[in-house]
Image (cartoon, rainbow, N blue to C red):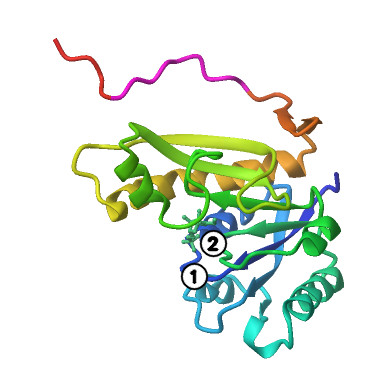
């Protein structure tokens, strides 16, 4: 993998994951840099993070393109113009076609706020609470054709606490997202990702040896 991996970050909203990637890539020894940010919403609050960091931004709205294929073609053209190596979806709330995913195959990753394959799609925190799970979390994965599927690079878990509402849980999960997304990008940039079929092996990563139980035992 290249000494400095060139990233495009695609957003639609707040951009807190974009912000985490900007902060991580600002370190001199981080092996990747963000060369452009694309938003499909012209009013995405996250754009301000890119502007503050002097990163080139581009708004490509589905509404101003005649069809979805043109929308994706515009994104690909812009990213190829910037010589992008890796596409990072960071709250980019638009489905991508098989054509686009094939074009960027194994060069496009996503962060999702659940322990995939559980709770794909929207309203994940509300659904996790309603399902009564004791842990949820977040996942960074390579993107495949079906929504929120693909080889898992890293996950972090977050306990679901009695009384949690979607907002409180989302806040705790987001904190973990901001840790694992830069880590996944770093591993890719360092060439540490090995594929065993559709499973990811990270060379040099230590397995956690602990066991987590929620609720914990009380005497
Ligand atoms: C994040 O929680 C991210 O995992 C989620 O959208 C949020 C974006 O927050 N993505 C998805 O649900 C994708 N399926 P952010 O704009 O503050 O980074």
Q: Which mark is residue 91?
A: 2
Q: Which mark is residue 42?
A: none
Q: Position of residue 169 (x, y in %)?
A: 32, 47
Q: Vertically, is 48 above or below 33?
A: below
Q: CA distance from mark 2 to mark 1?
A: 7 Å
Q: Quadrant of the N terminus?
A: top right
Determine which residue is flagged by label 1.
13
Q: Say few, some or many: other residues with alpha carbon within 10 Å of mark 1 (under 14 / 14 to 19 / 20 or more).
A: many
Q: Position of residue 32 (x, y in %)?
A: 72, 52
**Residue plotted at (41% across, 38% down):** 136
Q: Nearer the viewer, residue 73 or 189?
A: 73
For the residue with label 2, is its CB less than 8 Å from the closest atom of ligand 1? Answer: yes
Which segment did they paint magenta?
Answer: 206-214
Q: Nearer the viewer, residue 217 or 20?
A: 217
**Does the magenta-highlighted stretch encompass residue 193?**
no
Q: Vertically, is 143 above or below 198?
A: below
Q: Quadrant of the C terminus?
A: top left
Is 58 on the left or on the right of 216, as rendered?
Answer: right
Q: Is residue 61 visible?
A: no
Q: Nearer the viewer, residue 36 or 62?
A: 62
For the residue with label 1, is its CB less than 8 Å from the closest atom of ligand 1? Answer: yes
Q: Nearer the viewer, residue 38 or 25?
A: 38
Q: Say few, some or many: other residues with alpha carbon within 10 Å of mark 2 (under 14 / 14 to 19 / 20 or more).
A: many
Residue extending furthest toward the left: 219
Badge 2 or badge 1: first in the primary sequence: 1
**Which SS does the magenta portion mostly show?**
loop
CB under 8 Å between discs 2 and 1: yes
Q: Vertically, is 40 above or below 1?
A: below
């Amino acid at each position: 993998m290249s000494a400095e991996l060139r990233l495009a970050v695609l957003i639609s909203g707040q951009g807190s994951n974009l912000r985490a990637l900007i902060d991580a890539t600002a370190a001199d020894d981080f092996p990747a840099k963000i060369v452009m940010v694309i938003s499909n919403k012209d009013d995405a609050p996250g754009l301000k993070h890119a502007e503050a960091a002097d990163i080139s931004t581009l708004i490509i709205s589905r509404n101003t393109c005649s069809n979805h294929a043109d929308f994706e073609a515009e994104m690909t053209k812009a990213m190829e113009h910037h010589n992008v190596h890796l596409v990072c979806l960071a709250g980019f709330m638009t489905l991508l076609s098989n054509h686009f995913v094939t074009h960027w195959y194994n060069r496009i990753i996503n962060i999702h706020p659940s322990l995939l394959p559980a709770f794909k799609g929207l309203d994940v925190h509300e659904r996790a609470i309603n399902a009564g799970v004791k842990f949820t979390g977040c996942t960074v994965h390579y993107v495949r054709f079906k929504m929120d599927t693909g080889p898992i690079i890293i996950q972090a878990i977050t306990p679901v606490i009695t009384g949690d509402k979607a907002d409180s849980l989302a806040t705790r999960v987001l904190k973990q997202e901001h840790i694992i997304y830069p880590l996944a990008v770093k591993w890719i940039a360092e060439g540490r990702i090995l594929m065993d079929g559709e499973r990811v092996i990270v060379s040099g990563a230590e397995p956690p040896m602990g066991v987590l139980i929620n609720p914990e035992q009380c005497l």
